[in-house]
Image (spheres, coloured by chain):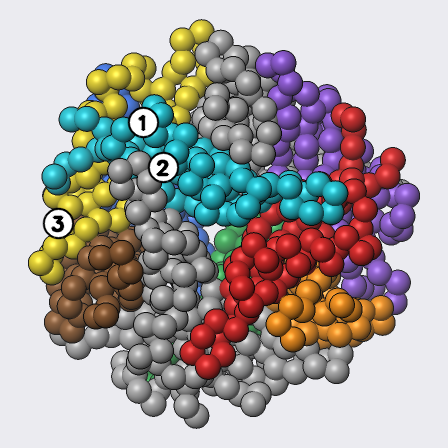
Chain colours: A green, C orange, D brown, F blue, G red, I purple, J yellow, K cyan
């Protein structure tokens, strides 16, 4: 276990409801093509405003996953 | 559309319930005096503790809006 | 009130549900040993992914409290 | 001259041609409502991509101007 | 009190004597047009040199004030 | 449109003429393998000096594109 | 002397007069419970505004002290 | 040579022995799927502690490689 | 396991030989008073120069450990 | 070639026309006293505004050059 | 005046009394070998503690001066 | 001792073996022209990759030395 190598990819998830859902959406989408995801790091929180209300949240996350040996 | 100019203002929204509500409150208040808001950026998350519990969240947001040509 | 001195400690709270609960958990735990907590600052948001879903959120918070004179 | 006070506002200028024009556009627009502008600081450079080409540059600038005494 | 919204503006105060006076000057000037100022944050300290001596200090401060509900 | 997920990749474009061309070159190269590019962010500007002149500019850009649902 | 280990704690000192006094107050308070203090680092300068004047300065300092072997 | 385009990927290498080995492991693993690697940048150094000792070092590196024209 | 709370302390380890030993020394010293250490983060690397040679390395590390429930 | 040592100096170049010319001017001036320049890094972009127009750009660059063995 | 080139050097001034004197000392010392100093930027404030009191302040300043054409 | 002034210079040391040697090389080279070196600060760690292996490490260090009174 000591010498695992991980790769990090950077996604932007979005959601009309909030930060947690935006991250959940990013992780769910990543699961379609990436195996062995281990952790995420939130690096930016922003969003769009439409008609004087928050239209959707956009959260940048880095997702780390184990590379096969 | 190419040469739009935007202005960014910096507000601190607060809420007893959480981050999303604090940002919503800031956007709602800005809507009283600012038109054509387009996006927001969260730059700081903090809050007050009262009686060993979170009293309210304070979230700093920059709000961008289109300036009239 | 003018010359209060505060100390800041750094905790990482975790929760399976989201950011606010992770911070709440950190503040609740700190209340067992720290008195006079006044504010918190979120400095990092990350978490673990298990079985392609977010297992728990890990939020780093600094907590400030008043030192006795 | 020693005790001048300046205010800084934050604008985002855009242009299809490049960074300098985006900043020029921001300064020109600010000139409609602000007097005594003295300096600018570029804090972010980004832009939109349309049809695999850069559609326009978006440059965030802070503009400093002298406040009347 | 929980849902107060604050706005932050950014000023540069200057003074020939030092940092504290430069900030004081910025706050005094802001008081001419802003009500309900609550806090300030120093974000940059610099100054001009004239004849091999410090001519004046220039201190960038963000000033937060409560917006009317 | 609310729940789009974006991926960001990081490229370094280079050009003997300047910053804009270096970014253009990076976007053009990315277009060979990436579809649905939406925005770019400049994160570093540097370059090589040869014979006391700037040989070429090297600009680091992050490019964001929409992932298929 | 080569293998000394130091611990850093983070305090916020406050003072109505200025930055130096705020740091002095933090160091004096720390001296009640910490021995062998060696250095300090200023990491944040802010303060409260009351009645359009600076009420007190709040300076965040990290204080380093030698741990017994 | 002037208009080369590079891509940067982000890996986390780990090793029980130290920083250099952790980076070496990341580069070796990358070599299985990436050609024309040119440079690396260390952006984070951390690790796990097990039984009061450092179990392994985890070093985040960005690796830059030339894209085919 | 989901709701663990961690505390982070900040130490500076030193060593005449190098970075890894400086971190090892900090972790070993912390083991005298802290239980359940889980990870460390390197945040600063510096050192003293004596007689034109590196006298010792000084590495700032944050150490995270589990708090009892 | 492996053990080259480089020195970095920090200059501010200015130009009425734009960023590239400001950097070119800095490199040209450095060439009068520095040999073996190898690379530059842009760390700040700002400028003066005169009569509501950009008077000149001021770009801070670090220039790296090889030291003789 | 438009195409002036400036050089920045980095000094650490110290003083037992406070920040302003530490910067003044750095500027005075620089005046012995540098002509045409124009501005300074404070980038770090720290100091030594001796016998539970601040022994001296150490302030890092960058000093900019005009290079002869 | 209280009013010492220090100057900081920025070097990049390189070595095929690792970080410590790269810093040692920079300090040794600086010793040829600088007297009274007192400390160093590592600000960047990177390196070149050749034939899928690390060719040499490049470590940016700031070196502080006492200026004569």
Q: Where is residue D49 in the image (x, y as percent from the top left)?
A: 27, 57
Q: Position of residue I8 (x, y in %)?
A: 74, 54
Q: Position of residue F63 (x, y in %)?
A: 37, 51
In screen coordinates, is G25 left or right of K25?
A: right
In screen coordinates, is I33 left or right of J18?
A: right
Q: In this view, does A45 lie above or below I58?
A: below
Q: Which callout, 2 or 1, points at the residue further toward the start of the chain? A: 1
Q: Which residue is drawn at 65% across and 51% down?
A: G62
SS for tag 1? loop
For residue K63, the mark is 2
On the same chain, marks 3 and 2? The answer is no
Q: Mark 2 lies on which chain?
A: K
Q: Which is nearer the eye, K19 or A63?
A: K19
Q: Label 1: how many residues lie within 10 Å, few (<14), some (14-19) or many (20+)?
A: some
Q: Specify whether residue I64 is in view.
A: no
Q: Name the mark nearer the viewer: 2 or 1.
A: 1
For residue K34, the mark is 1
> For the view shown, which residue lies furthest in the top direction?
J69
Q: Which chain carries label 1?
A: K
Q: In 3D space, how far apart are the residues under numbered discs 3 and 2 (Cα atoms)?
A: 23 Å
SS for tag 3? strand
């Amino acid at each position: 276990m000591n010498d695992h190598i991980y790769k990090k990819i950077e996604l932007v998830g979005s959601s009309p409801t909030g930060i947690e859902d935006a991250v959940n959406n990013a992780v769910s989408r990543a699961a379609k093509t990436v195996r062995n995801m281990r952790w995420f790091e939130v690096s930016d929180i922003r969003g769009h405003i439409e008609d004087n209300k928050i239209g959707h949240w956009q959260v940048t996350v880095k997702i780390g996953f184990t590379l096969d040996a």
